[in-house]
Amino acid sequence: GLWTSLVGAIFVGLVYTHCVHILVHCAQVLSVRLKQPHLGFAGIAEAAFHTGPSKCQPYTALAKSCVDGGLFLGYYSCCIVYIVFTASSFKQVVEYNFDLLMDVRLYIFLVTLVVIPIGCIRNLKYLVPFSFLAICALTFSCGFVLYEIFQDLPPLSSRPAFKGYSSLPLFFSTMVYAVDGIGTVFPIENSMRKPQNFLGSFGVLNISMIWIVAVYCVMGFFGYLRYGEDTQGSITLNISSSVMGQVVKTMVILNVLCSYGLFLFVPVEIAWRKLEPKVEKSRQTLYYYFMRIVLILGSVVLAAVVPDLEPFVGLVGAICSSTLILFFPPIIEMVTFWEDQAYMGRFRWRIYKNLLLIVMWLCTLITGTHISFLQIMKLYK
């Protein structure tokens, strides 16, 4: 519904921001405890269990592996979503200009020819030009999409304020997926000259999240008002078939393709960290690129299995994004400060707050996964 989604988007943004706050705070405290200046997400989980209560310490390696697994699945799923989105947009552009009808899976395999060379770029500095191109393309595309949305807007009363409880799990899962960028938080915080400026009322995190949630609220609210039940899994798939519309879709394709290598970087690094000690030094380069190509081809095959954007995004949000956002941060906070009575507060209220977040995670995981699977099964009937 129109108004329920607006309130829900703001709520998800607030919950996400809070979870990142507690995770970064834990990272700063654990860095002091261990005298290590920089900790990644998995390193924070490992440090929390290593320095936490004695009953938690045997699970140190498991905690690190779970976070690594969550990050791997989360970012690898993003690669799959990017391929599905690129193929869907490419299909629209080709069909409009050449009147050529083909199954979206054929476009997915055509996209492989582009993502293999981009995905094989090993050094992040060589991805910077692609990232810059992606930002430029995205900025221009967002401007045109907003221009299209505000043309001939129907009255607010033409859209339902609330559509029913059955659509809430998919909405929540999709929104969690949309705001999830928790894997990029620590590289940013670690690279700052004054990391203390990352948190705080007017810190980097709060200001950036206000902008991100505001963009999603504007796009989502007015996009649904404009297109109603015809709204696609990505709003760019709704824009007109005009020449400028085709240019924008092409630029969005460029944006997504340029970002593919950045999202693949995280799962590649996690997988290679596990594989590298088992490979002879003389063959490491060969195995490294072979692993990259296998991961790329795997994302293409999985994209071809579920070539529909909306249920797949919901599934990724329900399983991967919700776990990274709603499960790991409260667990890490409780383990880090379990013996700190002053931090836990009166009646140890932070424990109950974290348990509430874990209950939210369970609800999102179960209901979101169930609804997404039902939608995917419906596609194959």
Image: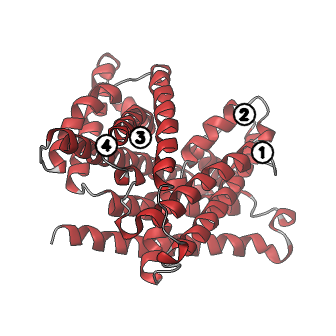
* Callout count: 4
Report, in whole angstroms, how far the alpha carbon at label 3 lies from the one at label 4: 20 Å
For marks 2 and 1, give the one nearer the viewer.
1
Residue named by callout 3: 267
Looking at marks 3 and 1 on the same chain, the residue that comes earlier in the sequence is marked by 1
Looking at marks 2 and 4 on the same chain, the residue that comes earlier in the sequence is marked by 2
Looking at marks 3 and 2 on the same chain, the residue that comes earlier in the sequence is marked by 2
Looking at marks 3 and 4 on the same chain, the residue that comes earlier in the sequence is marked by 4
Residue named by callout 1: 203
Identify which residue is drawn at 37% across, 70% down. 229
Q: Amino acid at mark 2?
A: Pro
Camera sees residue 108: no
Q: Along the horizontal axis of the image, is 355 left or right of 87?
A: right
For marks 1 and 4, give the one nearer the viewer.
4
For marks 3 and 4, give the one nearer the viewer.
4
Q: Find residue 21 and report its horizontal and vertical position in percent.
A: 71, 53
Report, in whole angstroms, how far the alpha carbon at label 3 lies from the one at label 1: 29 Å
Looking at marks 1 and 4 on the same chain, the residue that comes earlier in the sequence is marked by 4
Report, in whole angstroms, how far the alpha carbon at label 3 lies from the one at label 2: 24 Å
- Which numbered circle lies on residue 86? 4
Q: Amino acid at mark 4?
A: Thr
Residue named by callout 2: 37
